[in-house]
Amino acid sequence: MPACRDADQQSGERHRAFVLSDTMMRQIGVDTVRLTPMHGILSLTGRVIADENHLIDVFPFVGGTVQKVTVELGDYVSKGQVLAIIRSGEVAEYERQLADARSDLALAQKNLAVQRDLLGSKLASERDVLSAQRELAKAEAELNRIEEIYRIYGITNKSEYVVRAPIDGFVIRKDVNTDMTLRADRSSSMFTVARLNEVWVMADVYENDISKVSPGVAAEITTVAYPDSLILASVDKVFNVIDDRTRTMAVRMRVPNADAKLKPGMAAVAKVRYSRPGEMLSVAASSVVFDAGKAYVVVYRDRRNLRVQEVGIQETVEGRTYVTSGLNTGDVVLSKGQLFVYDALTD
């Protein structure tokens, strides 16, 4: 027992003898133990997808053979730009309709002129002129309809029609090649064009974490492609449906993407910050020293009064470590340069 007391006395004397020099005082940092609201971080696996409000599928107008495809997957296209040219026997029917509409219009115009002449000669009635005017109006409407179809679908006089980009954006899906035959009843699109100036990050939340996520909750997003680029966002929508297979619920985050760095299909991780009831003592995470499976801090009063204190910790969130034992509110601990002091005090 006397030997133990001697050892403790010598250890205490070493601790009391340790004094922070002026140089060390300039290199250390301190943090005050305080009660802080409880927060947690929920890490969600997600993926980047195009904003469905700015995405258009392009379907074939009629069946036919693809003569030419002018774009590739991933290309940026402008509204009205040619995507493909398709030759179709069905277009010939529209050519016949156009010819008939022009002929009917010319005939209606001539008939109206004749009826007006006859009216001047008292050989026709006002009713005959009105009837001729109605026929002319019908012929004009039919011609306008056919010409509008030609304009919308880019039909040419070579039994071809031109597929054009409906909006400015990127070709994110392409399912057509030169010489491919397209059926008139094809249900899948040839192209999908999307604007990517804003994208969605869709993530899955496990059923036991649903209560932690709600619209407006802040999120930090990183991607595999750009791991050092942190994107600040928030949960925009919670889809209140559970997937029976995965037992997860989908959530959506809108992300600005002016430089188009984020591509549909990219893997992403969304860290959602949520609040928990109550408060707990916390210190700066940098204050904690781990040694032999235990956690310690260096409690600071002044340059001559420092001690090593074992602490119980719960978790670390956003640079703060929640402490369950060993410290009190208002205690000051070293948060910078503490490793050197810890080694000196425990040597």
Image (cartoon, grey):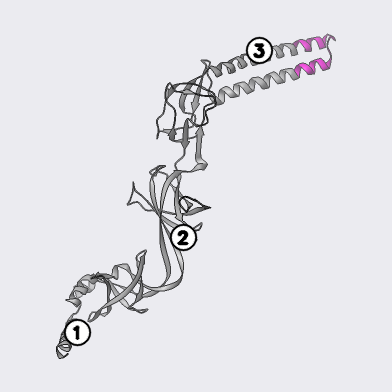
The crowd level at tag 1 (other Cα within 10 Å; few <14, some 14-19, many 20+) is few
State which quarter of the image contains the N terminus: bottom left
Among numbered discs 2 and 3, the one appearing first in the sequence = 3
User: Which residue in the structure is indicated by mark 2?
Assistant: 208
Residue 127 position, x and y percent, is: 83, 17
132 is within the stretch colored magenta: yes
Badge 3 marks a residue whose secondary structure is: helix
User: Which residue in the structure is indicated by mark 3?
Assistant: 103
User: Which residue in the structure is indicated by mark 1?
Assistant: 12
Residue 196 position, x and y percent, is: 44, 41
Task: Say if residue 166 shows up in the picture.
Answer: no
Among numbered discs 1 and 2, the one appearing first in the sequence = 1
- Nearest to the eye among marks 1 and 3: give it: 1
- Nearest to the eye among marks 1 and 2: give it: 2
**What distance separates the C-alpha of mark 1 from that of mark 2?**
50 Å
Q: Amino acid at mark 3?
A: Ser
Task: Give the magenta range.
Answer: 113-133
- What number of labels is visible? 3
- Nearest to the eye among marks 2 and 3: give it: 2
Q: Quadrant of residue 304?
A: bottom left
Give the residue at x 83% y 11%. Answer: 124
Q: Amino acid at mark 1?
A: Gly
State which quarter of the image contains the C terminus: bottom left
The crowd level at tag 3 (other Cα within 10 Å; few <14, some 14-19, many 20+) is some
Q: Is residue 233 above or below residue 117?
A: below
